[in-house]
Amino acid sequence: MERTSVAELAQLLRGELGRYSPGEKLASSRALMQQYQVSPVTVSRAIAVLVAEGLVVSRPGAGVFRAADARPAPAAGDTSWQEVALSAEAGVPPSRAADATGVLGALTLAPPEVVDLNSGYLHPTLQPERALAAALARAGRRPGAWSRPPVDGLPELRAWFARDIADTLTAAEVLIAAGGQSALTTALRSLAPPGAPVLVESPTYPGLLAVARAAGLRPVPVPMDQDGVRTDLLAAAFAASGARLFVCQPLFQNPTGAVLAGDRRAEVLRIARAAGAFVVEDDFARRLVHADAPAVPAPLIADDADGVVVHIRSLTKATSPNLRVAALAARGPALARLRAVQAVDSFFVPRPLQETALELVAAPAWSQHLRTLAAALRDRRSALAAAVAARLGADVLPERLPYGGYQLWLRVPAGWTAEGLAAAALRAGVAVTPGGPYFTAEPPAAHLRLSYAYAESAEQLAEGAARLGRALN
């Protein structure tokens, strides 16, 4: 029976390296298997770990040898000159300095002892790991799986995304991008020149604000309510700013969870068309609909024949943070601009990743995963909302609980700032997201975002709410 894991065997072998001189051959794989009672696969993987660490050298047909001793670390240089070089454009608009604070905060993994209500990705128990592994294996066996893909993406995958997004789309109007964030970057860099204003929902996803500012754009907030962006203020913002671009999340908006009301959908398109502007529709959460949700509205691009909407649809949120495959859909000259910018930035999305995505969505396991995920997200939303109401009071919850997405947008009780409560919560053992970075200016009220996607179970969500309650009290 296998008694030693790869990590344990690698640690044991590190301890044994002192017996060997640099360049001396280690014991054979067969001898290691007998000595530690492990399989050939475990030995092979443990050796690969040591090779990656530079401790040993593997020579096929000859064996494994201790590597030469590492050279001493070079003396630290003086990089202070970079402060001057990197600040050369300070005060000269448009500045392209990237503020990744909000993005890095969302990507930071909490330590094991902390309940993570911060991450926007699925917990491994919610990811379709078996289906992904099977899709990856099948993709690897496809003829030409490692050959160069078309710049626009695999035709079959583009056709699938076109059908998935809207009946009015064709594969020729779809580009494959390396995840939603990359697609968003391409869209903003393609559709607005540096220094231009870009209208954004307020509050909105900090990653969008970071992308806009890194491209030298000026985010202009347009307030929202429980029915999505306020179209009366959207028209005023276009008129006042002269913007030619509006970025929105009409379905399960991050962080509010709002769904754009039916009467506002046509208004958004009409207002943008009158302003001669594009609407970038970030449809990141369409596959995060809950099992108790009513029918969700079609994407804005389904009602747009004039090329106003540039649509982004990603597989990442509903699968794994590592399946960074998304679609950019557009019509007219804008599509050519998007294609050119994406080709310059990244050439193309790796073909094995595209083949894996195609195998995944074509398998029966895909629809089964979406049904399982919808039920799990419904249960987690309900569990977290109930626990928050019990520990903090129902008045901190939104008027309408979202029926899609992965987060709750809470009002911070009087007497606290969002940052202060988030810091107190972390000391109490729960990671939450303060709402400040979601606003381009001073927020009208203090908020916290609580994610229920990355917690391990409903019980852990309840424990997280209990710790937040203790921090508050």
Image (spheres, rainbow, N blue to C red):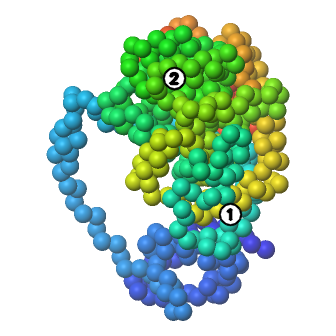
What residue would you read off at disc 1?
A: 136
Of 438 and 7, which appears nearest the observer? 438
| Residue 240 % position (x, y) | 39, 13
**Which of the two residues, 401 or 35, is positioned nearer the viewer here?**
401
Element type where label 2 sits in the image: helix
Q: Do the CB atoms of the residues marked 1 and 2 lie less than 8 Å apart?
A: no
Name which residue type carries label 2: Ala
Residue that mark 2 sits on: 272
Q: Secondary structure at mark 1?
A: helix
Q: Is residue 337 left or right of residue 430?
A: left
Is 369 left or right of 269, judged from the image as shown?
Answer: right
Q: Which mark is residue 49?
A: none
Q: Residue at x 49, y 20 (%)?
A: 274
Residue 55 visible (yes or no):
yes
The N terminus lies in quadrant: bottom right
User: In this rendering, is residue 406 above or below 336?
Assistant: above
Amino acid type, label 1: Leu
